[in-house]
Amino acid sequence: MNAGIFLRSTQLDDSIFDNALLFITEYNEKGALGFIVNKRFPRNINELAEFSNSIPFPIYEGGPVDQEHLYFIHQRPDLISEGDHVTGNIYLGGDFETAMILINTGVITEKDIRIFIGYCGWDDQQLEAEIQDGGWTITTGNIFE
């Protein structure tokens, strides 16, 4: 398995993973890291105190881990520096201050960047075991649709 793949949850329950589409951004000997890309957080970024001067911009529920922080995935490495390459033209993180300026000035849109609260994480071999047990299926997807 590699970073840059999509997983569809087979879980049909009331958890955050019910019908979730995940994008895996890191995969190595320590485990895996990814984000739920198809579940909107109930508030926009301007509704968070720290970003009250921002334009309304959607936030997504990235996962149950570390919901005290925001993360982002983008496809504009030409404008946002310091991101970690995931696959193709997709990057994880980078200069968040610059990203927010670009969002607020309309230079980048939802077609360029997705902001998440929290993330999904697995220890080494944990995700593989969940896939083998039928909890996830490997699929295709597009983050920016």
Image (spheres, rainbow, N blue to C red):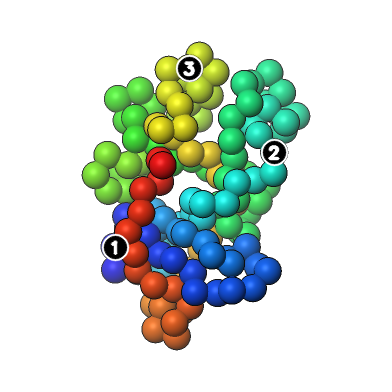
> What label does residue 12 carry, if any?
none
Label 1 to label 3, Cα distance in Å?
33 Å
Residue furthest toward the top? 105
The residue at the point 54 percent across, 65 percent down is: 19
Label 1 residue SS: loop
The residue at the point 68 percent across, 27 percent down is: 46
How dense is the environment of label 2, judged by Cα within 10 Å: few (below 14), some, or many (20 and up)? few
Residue 27 seen in render = no
Residue 52 seen in render = yes
How dense is the environment of label 1, judged by Cα within 10 Å: few (below 14), some, or many (20 and up)? few
Image marks 2 and 3: residues in contact by CB distance under 8 Å: no
How dense is the environment of label 3, judged by Cα within 10 Å: few (below 14), some, or many (20 and up)? few
In the picture, residue 24 is in which quadrant?
A: bottom left
Q: Vertically, is 105 above or below 26?
A: above
Q: Which residue is under mark 2?
A: 43
Spot occupied by residue 21 in the image (x, y as percentages of width and height):
47, 59
Q: Which residue is under mark 3?
A: 106
Using the image as rendered, state which of residue 66 and residue 111 is in the foreground: 111
The three-letter amino acid code for the residue at tag 1 is Asn
Label 2 to label 3, Cα distance in Å?
19 Å
The residue at the point 32 percent across, 55 percent down is: 4
Label 2 to label 1, Cα distance in Å?
32 Å
Please state, as top left, top right, bottom left or bottom right, where the N terminus lies in the image.
bottom left
Spot occupied by residue 59 in the image (x, y as percentages of width and height):
59, 40
The residue at the point 37 percent across, 60 percent down is: 6
The three-letter amino acid code for the residue at tag 2 is Arg
* Sequence order check, earlier mark of 2 and 3: 2
Image marks 1 and 3: residues in contact by CB distance under 8 Å: no
Label 3 residue SS: loop
Q: Which residue is under mark 1?
A: 2
